[in-house]
Image (cartoon, helix red, strand yellow):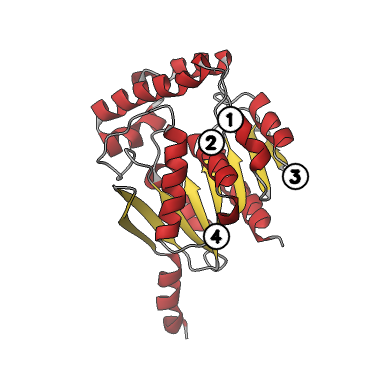
Amino acid sequence: ESSHQAPSTTFVTSVTSAKIQVNGVHLHYQQTGQGDHAVLLLPGMLGCSQTDFGPQLKSLNKQLFTIIAWDPRGYGRSIPPPRDFPPDFFERDAKDAVDLMQALTFKKFSMLGWSDGGITALIAAAKYPSLIHKLVVWGANSSVTKEDIKLYNAIRDVSKWSEKVRKPMEEMYGHEYFARTCEAWVDGISQFAEKSGNICEHLLPYIVCPTLIIHGGKDPLVPQFHPEYLHKSIQGARLLVIPEGKHNLHLRFAEEFNTEVEKFLAEA
């Protein structure tokens, strides 16, 4: 009996990898599951499907969800082009992400956005409300304060990163591209502080989909003020704090994270 089961199980759990041309760039993505509910995973700064979402691609419910994890342009395997940070880089990522999902024929989908990917997801949810089903963000912020700039400058030099976080990045990019792009990111995100600090605060009132904000109580990169601001500015949003969580709570506390997210996405 069990031998009849094997093929379908392999099919259910396999992760495929492909590229598709969107807005003049060949975007790389990974896909798994065959549920009716499409979910896009949006990685953080310098992140990609491979480095940022292992436990989600492996363990999120593949009967309920079809899961897509993408590499934004200039990150992961969506190179060329090399990554750059014009003033509208978050809007550009938001448009790329939405256009990718449309190109893959997912008419309506939910988003799980981590860190920079959370900012991208907030912008996408505000600008394309008819396409977004539900939104989950963590480690994200809608503005940049002077305190934030200090935290970013502390990670500017990648040789100071812990071996554990640095290694997969260096394997993905090679040391030079990784180091150069991290510096360019710090300059890119600092642009916002030089203006008013606003990244997407003005867009938050336009987010109408059900929204879950998750925060790691010990996140060294995102002060509590940010998730609290999102919580009070997005209509009907919920805030879940994982007290021991740091910035990468979805990796470190993957089981708890996946359970909460599945519950939120599945409820009517």
- Counting residues from the start of the chain, the first of labels 1 and 3 encountered is 1
Residue at which label 2 appears: 119
- Secondary structure, mark 3, is loop
Amino acid at pointer 2? Ile
Q: Position of residue 87 (x, y in %)?
A: 43, 27
Label 4, label 1: how far apart the Cα atoms are: 24 Å
Contact check, label 1 and label 2, Cβ < 8 Å: yes
Label 3, label 4: how far apart the Cα atoms are: 20 Å
Rendered position, 25 above or below 245: below
Q: Nearer the viewer, residue 190 or 22?
A: 22
Residue at which label 1 appears: 141
Q: Residue at x 54, y 24 (%)?
A: 221
Residue that sits furthest to the bottom in the current view? 1
Amino acid at pointer 4? Lys
- Secondary structure, mark 2, is helix
- Counting residues from the start of the chain, the first of labels 1 and 2 encountered is 2
Q: From the viewer's perspective, is 236 left or right of 250?
A: right
Q: Position of residue 125 (x, y in %)?
A: 58, 46
Label 1, label 2: how far apart the Cα atoms are: 6 Å
- Counting residues from the start of the chain, the first of labels 2 and 4 encountered is 4
Rendered position, 148 above or below 9: above
- Counting residues from the start of the chain, the first of labels 3 and 4 encountered is 4
